[in-house]
Structure formats: C-alpha cells, structure tokens
C-alpha cells in the first residue's frame, strides 16, 4: 500500500499564495474603483430606475374625444322631449312582469315542479328600464350616459331566466318562403333572452370567425350575419355621436344552461342536438335551414354571441318601418334606378318627406355609417312615430357589416355622392376623426377593448375605417368643389359649434 504524498501540502500552499496575490493586486483594487465611481454595472449602488407608471386612463384618446367641444351637449332650448312617460311605462311593464310571473307559475305547475321559484321583480332602477326612459328626440341615449355602461355590464353578467324565438320567427311558424331572395329574419338564428331584472336582449350567435372575410362571390343578401359586427357597429355609432344603435355587448352564452334549460318553447327545445364532437348545437326552424350543417354549436356548451338591448315595446312606442330610397334590387341580375341614374336624388327630393326637413340628411348619415362598416343590406329603416318626420333614424340590424376589410363598396355612399348634402356637425366630426390625435381606428380600438370578447375586430378592419373615412371626405370635397359649401353643408342648429381654438376646418 503506497504511503501519503509528502509534496501535497506544498502544492496547496503555493496555490493559496497565488490566489491571495491575485485578489490583493487585481480584484480588490478594481472593486474599490467601481464602488467609488458608482459604476452602473453595480445593482446594489445604482439600481435601474423603475419604469414610469403608465398614464392614467383619464388621458385616453377616447375620453379626450368625448370631451371635445363637438361632443359636448348643446345648450338646450328646453328639456329634451322624452319618448316615454315614466308613469305610463312603469304601469305597462309592471303588468307585463305580473303576467309573465303568472304564466311561469302555471308552466311549473304543469311540469309538476315543486321547488319554489321567486317571482321576477320589476325594479324602477333597472338599467334596461332607465335606458328606455332616457330615449329622447336627440337619440337613444344622452351623451356620457352612465345608464348605458350599466346596461352593458348587466347584459354581460345577469342570469338568463327565459329564452325564446323572436316575434319575426314566431310569425313565420317555420313556414319560410324559399322563393324569396331576401330571406326572412327568422332564418338568421337569433333568440330573445330575458334576464333576472326582467330586461330583454336579442342574441345573435357567432357564425363566422373574426379573421375570415366574406368570399368575393357572395351576394350581399346571402352574406353571413356576424355577432362581432353588431358589437362594433354600436361602438362606431357612439364614436360618431349618432346614438342610433341600441347598446350591444358580447357575451359567452352557455347554450345548455342559459337557453335550453330555461326555454318554454317546445320547438326551440326540439332543435337542440349533440354533435359528433360532443358539442351542444341548435339550428333555426325553417324548411331550408333545418339541417345540421346550418347549426351553431357551443364548445362544448359555450357560444360567443352579441346581445342587443331591446327597444321599448311597440305598444308603448310605435315605430315605422320605411323602405330605403336607395334600396338594392336583391336580385342576381337586376338593378334599381339609383344604380343606373346619377340624377336619381332629384327624384327623391320631390317626394315627401325627403323634400324638406332632416329626413334626407339623416339618410346621408345612415349611408356614411353603412359605408364605414361595409353594410349593403339596409333595405329598410325604422323611426319612432312620436317624433314625427324629423325624428332620427334607427340603425338596426348591422350584422352584415365588417365582412370585407379589403374592399370599399362606394355604392353605399350613393345618397351622399348623388344628393351632395351633409350635416355640418357630421362633417366636423368626420374631419376630427381623421386627425392623428383622434384617428378613427384608434378610437375604435380603445372602445372595443371594453368588451369581454375583445378583440372584436381584426386590425385590417380597424385600418379599413381610416381608409373609408378618407373616401367620405373626398366625396364631400368633390361636392363642395362642384356646388359650393353653402349648398352642400347644411347647418345643424341642434348642435353647438366648436370654439375657434378647437374648430376643425371645413376645407378638405
């Protein structure tokens, strides 16, 4: 057995001496110099400064837009004329709530359900009821209305207590006319959901993914109805300060618990099925739609959709449905007169109520709105009868918008390009939204982030808004160059003008 090596301690002493010399003559002087100079590489002496806190949302571009003079409420000539009388509306809705509770109780007795079910109360402070009471001649809701934001939250959060077909679908009774090119609204698979506060909303399920574009070969009257288009249309309408689209919000719906298990409609119950992928699906009750390939399905139960707040009952606030003078042919090979006659507006101006008042100007507003979203399906418009011929137009059913971001359908602008008139305040706001500080795509991007289904629109659709806005302004400029500003730009006396320091120039 070999003995221990006698040179090992000497080797260890030599290595220790070398390490001590290196530490004393090299490492320690360098460390002292860096500490004395406060070298940036030393985290203990000079820590990296904390990142500045993000700017408060109070400085958001959207809030600055709504604080702009063009978006401030005009000094009223008097109190805004409301659509509904509060007492009459409360009496009416209390009767409806009592009737619904009685029917629900009878329904449970027929099914021998013994578990107690509390009646649904009608609360005057409910957001949907306050929304109805806030409708006036000026629009569906006041500027900066807290009621609208509360209503959007309630539609996102409240429990559904019933689900049913819409009145249009009930009128069809499943007997759709397959010879019609313009398909009845029932085939678009929309449902009426009622919430725990007795409010109602129209549910439109997701039929097309956000990143998908409508195929070029599709006619506008067979295009998909997109839930995200309904959501985005509400936000755009509010940014334009039209306030003519009912509050709309996105929500994930459990089709089993929030539709199938709460509906009393046996026909609706019968169209539910489970797909081979174990997803719960349902389809519309219509001869050419009663096929599983037209169904919408959860994943396995959850389904995206839009919820649009109901307007007041027609018994309280009757509405007129009026054909759009610039209606399309809804035919594969025919054209309407406005599509072939550039002087068509002269004919329209001879017909009451387009011969005077604000109706034609409101039609132009609607055309601008539809052009921005790419909606070619505005065959009718609705108005509240109480406000007469000069009342605002309702911008309903916008689900066929935002189908093609790569194409700008300029024929939608025919009312503007043929009549060459526009409200002064509409033009001023459009020009403001073309400014870098208030760019329309930025306003929409920020506004849509408030929705739980964000991103609601893809980036190409947002950028298309800026491009189409420039086309609108070019069309107005062409009209002004041809006829002069005095004949093209109509003074809007119900609105205030921006002060000189903030005024957007009319020159385009």
Image: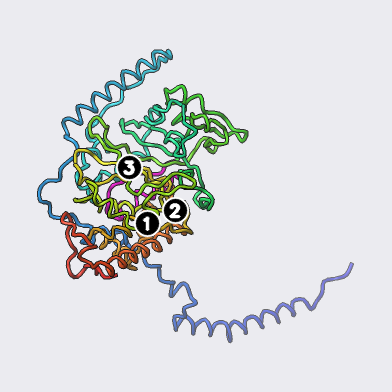
What SS does tag 2 mark?
loop
The tag earlier along the polypeptide, 3 or 2, is: 3
* Residue 100 appearing in the image: yes
**What residue appears at the point 27 percent right and 54 percent down from the top-left corner?**
241
**What residue appears at the point 30 percent right and 61 percent down from the top-left corner?**
430
What SS does tag 3 mark?
strand
Number of other residues with Cα within 10 Å of mark 3, as a class: few under 14, some 14 to 19, many 20 or more? few
The answer to whether residue 374 is left or right of residue 71 is right
Name the quadrant of the N terminus: bottom right
* Residue 230 appearing in the image: no
Q: Observer-nearest residue: 494 or 174?
A: 174
Circles 1 and 2, Cβ within 8 Å, touching? The answer is yes
Q: Which mark is residue 424?
A: none
Residue position for label 1: 444
Residue position for label 2: 457
| Residue 304 in the image, given as x and y percentages of width and height | 47, 41
Residue position for label 3: 323
Number of marks present in the image shown: 3
The answer to whether residue 12 is left or right of residue 128 is right
Mark 1 or 3: in front is 3
| Residue 256 in the image, given as x and y percentages of width and height | 49, 30
* Span highlighted in magenta in the image: 226-251
């Amino acid at each position: 057995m070999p003995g221990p090596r006698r040179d090992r301690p000497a080797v260890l002493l030599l290595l220790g001496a070398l390490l001590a010399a290196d530490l004393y003559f090299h490492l320690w002087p360098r460390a002292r110099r860096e500490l004395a100079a406060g070298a940036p590489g030393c985290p203990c002496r000079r820590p990296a400064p904390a990142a500045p806190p993000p700017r408060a949302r109070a400085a958001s571009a959207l809030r600055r837009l709504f604080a702009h003079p063009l978006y401030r409420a005009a000094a009223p000539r008097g109190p805004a004329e409301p659509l509904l009388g509060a007492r009459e509306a409360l009496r009416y809705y209390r009767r409806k709530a009592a009737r619904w509770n009685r029917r629900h109780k009878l329904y449970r007795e027929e099914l021998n359900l013994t578990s107690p079910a509390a009646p649904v109360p009608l609360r005057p402070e409910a957001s949907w009821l306050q929304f109805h009471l806030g409708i006036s001649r000026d629009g569906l809701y006041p500027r900066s209305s807290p009621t609208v934001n509360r209503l959007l939250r309630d539609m996102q959060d409240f429990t559904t207590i019933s689900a049913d077909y819409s009145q249009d679908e009930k009128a069809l009774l499943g007997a759709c006319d397959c010879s019609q090119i313009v398909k009845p609204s029932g085939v678009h698979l929309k449902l009426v959901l009622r919430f725990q506060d007795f409010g109602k909303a129209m549910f439109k399920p997701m039929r097309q993914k956000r990143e998908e574009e409508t195929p070029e070969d599709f006619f506008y009257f067979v295009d998909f109805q997109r839930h995200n288009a309904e959501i985005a249309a509400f936000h755009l309408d509010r940014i334009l300060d039209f306030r003519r689209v009912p509050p709309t919000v996105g929500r994930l719906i459990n089709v089993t618990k929030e539709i199938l298990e709460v509906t009393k409609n046996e026909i609706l119950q019968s169209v539910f099925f489970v797909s081979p992928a174990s997803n719960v699906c349902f389809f519309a009750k219509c001869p050419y739609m009663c096929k599983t390939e037209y169904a919408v399905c959860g994943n396995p139960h959850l389904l995206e959709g839009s919820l649009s707040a109901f307007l007041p009952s027609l018994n309280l606030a009757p509405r007129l449905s009026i054909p759009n003078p610039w209606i399309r042919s809804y035919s594969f090979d025919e054209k309407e007169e406005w599509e072939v006659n550039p002087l068509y507006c002269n004919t329209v101006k001879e017909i009451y109520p387009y011969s005077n008042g604000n109706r034609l100007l409101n039609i132009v507003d609607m055309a601008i709105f539809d052009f921005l979203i790419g909606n070619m399906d505005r065959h009718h418009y609705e108005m509240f009868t109480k406000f007469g011929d000069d009342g605002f137009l309702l911008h309903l059913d916008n689900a066929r918008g935002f189908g093609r971001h790569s194409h700008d359908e300029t024929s939608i602008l025919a009312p503007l390009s043929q009549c060459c008139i526009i409200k002064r305040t509409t033009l001023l706001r459009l020009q403001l939204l073309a400014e870098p500080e208030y760019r329309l795509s930025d306003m929409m991007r920020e506004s849509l982030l408030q929705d739980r289904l964000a991103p609601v629109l893809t980036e190409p659709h947002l950028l298309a808004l800026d491009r189409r806005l420039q086309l609108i302004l070019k069309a107005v400029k062409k009209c002004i160059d041809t006829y002069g500003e005095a004949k093209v730009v109509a003074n809007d006396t119900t609105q205030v003008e921006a002060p000189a320091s903030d005024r957007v120039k009319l020159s385009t």
